Image (cartoon, coloured by chain):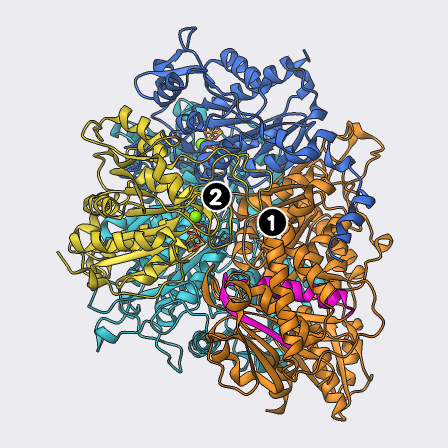
Chain colours: A orange, B cyan, C blue, D yellow
Amino acid sequence: MAKEALNILIGGEAGQGLVTIGQVLAKVLVRAGYFIVVTQDYMSRVRGGHNTYAIRVCPQPIHSPREGVDLLIALDQETLELHRGELNPGARAIADTGLTCAEAACYNVDFNAMTEGRYVNSVALGVAGALLGLDLELVDAGLKEYLGKKKPQEILDKNRAALEAAYAHARQNHPGFAPLPPPAAPRRRMLLNGNEALALGALAAGLKFLAFYPMTPSTSIAQTVINHARDLGVVVEQAEDEIAAVNMALGASFAGAPAMITTSGGGFALMAEGVSLAGISETPLLLAVVQRPGPATGLPTRTEQADLEFVLHAGHGEFPRAILAPGSVEECFHLAARALALAEASQGPVFILSDQYLADSYRAVEPFDLAAVEVVRAGERAIADPENYLRYALAADGLSPRALPGQSAALVKADSDEHTPAGVITEAAAVRLAQQTKRLAKYGLLLERTLAPVFSGPEHPDLLLLGWGTSQGVVAEAAAELRARGRQVATGHFRQPWPLKAEQFLPRLRAARQVVMVESNATGQMARLIRRETGFEIPRLVLRYDGRPLTPEYILRALAD
Amino acid sequence: MAKEALNILIGGEAGQGLVTIGQVLAKVLVRAGYFIVVTQDYMSRVRGGHNTYAIRVCPQPIHSPREGVDLLIALDQETLELHRGELNPGARAIADTGLTCAEAACYNVDFNAMTEGRYVNSVALGVAGALLGLDLELVDAGLKEYLGKKKPQEILDKNRAALEAAYAHARQNHPGFAPLPPPAAPRRRMLLNGNEALALGALAAGLKFLAFYPMTPSTSIAQTVINHARDLGVVVEQAEDEIAAVNMALGASFAGAPAMITTSGGGFALMAEGVSLAGISETPLLLAVVQRPGPATGLPTRTEQADLEFVLHAGHGEFPRAILAPGSVEECFHLAARALALAEASQGPVFILSDQYLADSYRAVEPFDLAAVEVVRAGERAIADPENYLRYALAADGLSPRALPGQSAALVKADSDEHTPAGVITEAAAVRLAQQTKRLAKYGLLLERTLAPVFSGPEHPDLLLLGWGTSQGVVAEAAAELRARGRQVATGHFRQPWPLKAEQFLPRLRAARQVVMVESNATGQMARLIRRETGFEIPRLVLRYDGRPLTPEYILRALAD
Amino acid sequence: MLDIATYGEFETAWCPGCGNHNLLKAMKKALAARDLAPKDLLLVGGIGQAAKTPQYLKANAFCGLHGRSLPAATGARLANPRLKVVVNSGDGCHYGEGGNHFLAALRRNIDLTVIVHDNQVYGLTKGQASPTSLEGFVTKTQPEGVWAAPFQPLAVAVLHRVSLVARGFTGEPDHLAGLLEQALAVEGLALVDVLQPCVSFNKINTFKWYQERVYHLDAGHDPTDFAAALAKAQEFGQRIPLGVIWRGDRAPYSSHFPPLAAGPLYDQEVDRAALEHVLEKYF
Amino acid sequence: MLDIATYGEFETAWCPGCGNHNLLKAMKKALAARDLAPKDLLLVGGIGQAAKTPQYLKANAFCGLHGRSLPAATGARLANPRLKVVVNSGDGCHYGEGGNHFLAALRRNIDLTVIVHDNQVYGLTKGQASPTSLEGFVTKTQPEGVWAAPFQPLAVAVLHRVSLVARGFTGEPDHLAGLLEQALAVEGLALVDVLQPCVSFNKINTFKWYQERVYHLDAGHDPTDFAAALAKAQEFGQRIPLGVIWRGDRAPYSSHFPPLAAGPLYDQEVDRAALEHVLEKYF
Ligand SMILES: Cc1ncc(C[n+]2csc(CCOP(=O)(O)OP(=O)(O)O)c2C)c(N)n1
Ligand SMILES: Cc1ncc(C[n+]2csc(CCOP(=O)(O)OP(=O)(O)O)c2C)c(N)n1
Ligand code: SF4
Ligand code: SF4
Ligand SMILES: [Mg+2]
Ligand SMILES: [Mg+2]
């Protein structure tokens, strides 16, 4: 695997500050011009236990985590025990002198001596910065910025002192760790994780209303919107439950605010009726569902891709929907923006399906081209004949004119019961037939706009590795490894699992000698869906369902089996 | 179509008593030895509007409704207007003198004169009984029994007098209507609709707990259980909402009571999280979902089969389930009993999927063989080593020993989080993997016990007509018509849409020259599922989604297109 | 003052004699008195007989899910502060399926006029007990009578000090119209629980039953006296008070949201400079 | 009186200093005092820090969904009348997501011991406002402070006259144990709302904050005096009363179900004769 890349793993108990170290280090690395992929592994508790924050760093672009550890920052003994076996050749472990660190690889630092035992994280950061060959100024600035919002100057100074002492100490007693190769051409990049990018994408596209109920790993989308709500004029409401959240968002969207909900599988399970209401009332709604392993509470802070079929079929009755599944932090931004616009365009529910791995994975992200983002404008603002306005007028393409209540003299009636073109309850069979046919016609619009899977590699490969959503980078890197070993490998990334347009991918599937689908679930839901839509049976699946993210190594091992 | 059969249609406003007439007539016809198929068409309101109660009656077994009307009992003018066009040759309409009844076919009776304008339904019943050639005693008894529970003797007497006067009047002024041919060999049969049979099946199998929230067209299952709860020792609770209902049922089932919930699509949408909890906690649960047309509130009192995919995928995460879909009133009984047992056997959620058409369709039903019903016994009662009892002990077939809390010294911990064999929260990847693999292994058990589709007709037909669930009789009668016209037609009825075992049906599908799937939905969900599981694409679909039940005529027209 | 004809005249699906007919009339009167043009009015309902009300008025309407009218109304109100949002639903919808939203709406004091058609029974689904059914109330579904205590919506609302709590009776349509008019005038949440006889399924709490028990709160009752209001809110037995029970002075929920000061959200463009400024924070 | 060791000793996932540790100890003491053998005990929880409690006691347990502990517990109680069913969950679980079930449980007076770990915050999801967060409470998620009024669980419970309503404080574990013991002795619903400081996310309502405010209800308070109880139930400010606030005498809900008189439902065979008799009605 790429030689120049390095895996940094910070481990410790929840509450020990490993996220602080990780975040500052990630920011500094990005500012220094490196590419990173962060993987966060944490328990469903607030203090104690064992969490890790892993940063893969590389001067060249990278797209997935890797197994193995080159630099281990251990905040407790358990971290040393648990990750001992993962150390790569030449790896170093940084640990307090108090910790028994049998390995030759271990670099013990007397954290306490350096900082009255208080600013341990700054010490760790100083040591890591020095070993990695990072500029002290950058590290200093990163720490200050991170703590700056919350801490008084005095504390900042003490942290800085601890950091600098540790940095100097590590420089002097250089423990034989090769620093990072210099980055290519340093450019300004953002540090963003999937959830932040998703939130920003929606905001850029004109999100005006968000309702949510807290649920890991989706909460940070809502949190990001909240952080900017005042600046961007967004109404955010923490609902009393997920049912309220989805119905609030529908009410707001009906009234003209581009609206989103954020949740995870268990919370989404409570929204199915609301999704169905979006369907029949033809109300635009963006649903961001960040998956975690189920069933039920399952592993609340880990990752899985097992809610595709659920999201595709959630809600009683039949109505069109779209599902977008970003494969990178950049795609989180772009697909969220696209999804918000698609919800408006199709007057119905559109999903972004992500998962904990991507949600929490920080990356170095190129600046976004805001001019390229389509900004949503809700409803039709000029209703020709408001007196005779019909919210659900028949239309061959399924798109009735959407007026906004109060915006003009046109009165708007939205209805959960089957209704006439005017939005009035009906039980007439013919009207039902016409309305249902009209609604379903919007499937055509969605199909027309569906994003083609992204293929790379040869047209007629020996092996076509497929994935959907968040596994994009992992699949790409696994393929690169295989190519490096001389195999003819192509990849395909489904970034929009629904609707599926066979001509966009079936020829590629048929042209490959072997097709393998990689999914973070136990039953191969995407493969099943492809068969349902095309009859093409993907003969081999690489599945992972222990709650841990896929890695290129995992895929390669599975293929070697 | 079968000459001897007759279609009776009773029409009027809600609240006018047309159900009374229909119910009494149905009971009398069954007692007289006839076969019937009732179709109820009613609006989502309590008074007014236009409802109908249709009885198809025949001396031979019949399995579906038919279009057309032979005897129209019109309680209002609207009924005459609306159903004029449906009258078959030789049809008669019975109506009060007050109603304008232009047709020659019309038989005006002066309802008021006969009964002080009060017991109009009894008059209608008397006339209908006479025209159909039913025994007066039987009709008298039927009416008395129906009213008997609620009305005082004086009112009963007046109704009887009205009925007898009308009967005599119709006999005298015989309006040239050919009475029913005599039934074959009169046998004692029950009058039951789908929901009643479903409730009775569950009760026969040992149902002990029911939680529900009222929702048409499922409520009559709960009502039937309530009617017999005291006699059969069942605990029934009307929950505050559907979420409560499913969680109550899970709590009760965990504690050892074979448990059921009843609902329709919109209510079920609120239960998806509970279904997922049944999955991970491995708690048996029978869910009776009686479909009506969506999305959302849709057509609340009509029929559709559009919740198959939703029910199949409801709940986040992956876990096994089974879906049974009865095709007749008898099957409602048998499949409900089977489903309750299957829930216990597989320690998880099992569905009965019915719809409004079958729910409300009364039939003449042969007595059940109670000895053949497997009675559910919850849990394992003799735990070998209670001190070391493990609720979720690993097991190759997925079946951990299910002890009941309080029943022995074994302590039982059920858990919504991923858990160890002891039922304690874990976040360990290996334990997760083992538990999820164990749970999914129960799919094998379900597959083993899955009911094969029922085929009839030639192995290599010209046309294979497929259906699932409630369309069984309609498909059978459509096929019979086609055969009568000389076509080589076979039928296949999927009574268990999930899991699907390809070898049980794929050869038959392959052996047919043409395969057509008949479904009461707009997208062909069952056909899609078959393709997903087998790759077999059913090239032609007959779909109905206007909320009205399928009829043989509808299928034939669609095929002729 | 508008003409009540403004709101149109529709055929309803309600039973003859149902209390809802008078309720609808009273609503029209109150809306007209408050000069609320159909265009500025959003009617929100759940599912049930009561929830059909928005179908029978010329206005904007969002007829959503059973039990979910309050969150939908809340969302709409927080998206367009110019809309007067009025919610009609039944006791089952508001206090049963929607109980959690009812509590949350009270806590928020969200600017809605909440009209509960309280017939103490599930009408549309044909007569099951509702959260306000009295103990012992016998139905087909509760053949041995209701065992749970009735929910006390008014007392719970007073406890959480919403802007207005009132009780009306469809048997007194003019008085009811007056109450609704006061409720419509309020900012924040105004709850009007209306005794609405269901002639088809509630044979106990009939028009006559209510009539024998209701009385008018007079000047002696000070709706800003919390203790008095809490006491009156609980009175439901031989005597049932009609009128405004409580007036609170909490701020309406929408007043806390800065974007709403600028009018409907649909008129607010994305501020590109602000957005760029936000993105800058991530570099 | 059992030994508290009966309920085992487990490593918890709670933060050091969290009020839950004392709550757990108090529970063990109360259970032991009531002689409740693990086998006869069913602990039910939702999801949250509080809801982990059943994991840390030797007993039967059903750890279900966030907000849904009460219906699951209700179902279990109505299936096996021999189980003592104790519910532990947080303020978010019981009063937020589960608010509708809370209301329904009160109305039913279902025989459950309901222990609410009330830290006025969402602990497990890291510090969002909960239904009992006070107005103005600032969190990362509510950066401008909470705008809704806090839910008043005790007053609502008193209003519906459940069997027992009490408030405890983890800072007074012996007193709390005594309260829990009384709650466990009750038939019908016993609600114990426990002030449980969250050291990680609630920096306002801290141990000290509670300590400065709590006082004990003394003999001067008659918990069968409804008006007094309703008043005490609302007291939450400079002074917060601890103790049994209310005792009601409504029948426990399970007493209404005839089959439960015969013991657990799992022991009750299908009565074939009764079944045949039932089927006979359909001929
Ligand atoms: C999720 C869901 N559950 C159940 C129903 C069925 N349902 C429709 S109306 C209703 C109750 C109506 O009672 P109420 O709210 O008191 O209104 P009323 O008809 O008495 O005016 C129910 C249970 C539904 N439509 N949706
Ligand atoms: C349906 C659902 N929504 C959201 C969550 C996420 N969640 C877990 S615990 C919790 C809140 C916990 O707060 P509280 O009940 O007060 O318990 P505490 O942790 O404070 O003890 C939430 C929102 C979930 N598990 N399920
Ligand atoms: S059922 Fe009751 S509430 Fe419904 S319309 Fe009829 S009388 Fe009114
Ligand atoms: S987060 Fe709060 S409630 Fe949860 S364990 Fe820590 S201190 Fe206790
Ligand atoms: Mg009602
Ligand atoms: Mg809490």
Amino acid type indicated by mark 1: Lys
Quarter occupied by residue A428: top right
Quarter occupied by residue B431: bottom left
Q: Nearer the viewer, residue A110 or C84?
A: A110
Classify A216 as above or below B156.
Answer: below
Label 1: chain? A
Residue A503 on image: x %, y %: 80, 72
Q: How many marks?
A: 2
- Residue in view at x 50 percent, y 14 percent: C173
In the rendered structure, does residue D95 fall within the stretch colored magenta?
no
Question: Which range of residues does the magenta coloring cover?
Answer: A7-33
The reply to whether residue B199 is in sight is no
Left or right relative to C108: residue B223:
left
Label 2: chain? D
Say what secondary structure mark 2 lies in.
Answer: loop
Amino acid type indicated by mark 2: Ser
Q: Nearer the viewer, residue B539 or C208?
A: C208
- Residue in view at x 75 percent, y 49 percent: C278
Q: Quadrant of the N terminus of chain A?
A: bottom right
Residue A539 on image: x %, y %: 64, 84
Residue on which disc 2 sits? D130
Q: Nearer the viewer, residue D170 or C137?
A: D170
Residue on which disc 1 sits? A150
Left or right relative to B557: residue A385:
right
Question: Is the CB–ligand 2 distance for label 2 below 8 Å?
Answer: yes
Quarter occupied by residue B250: bottom left
Classify A476 as above or below A405.
Answer: below
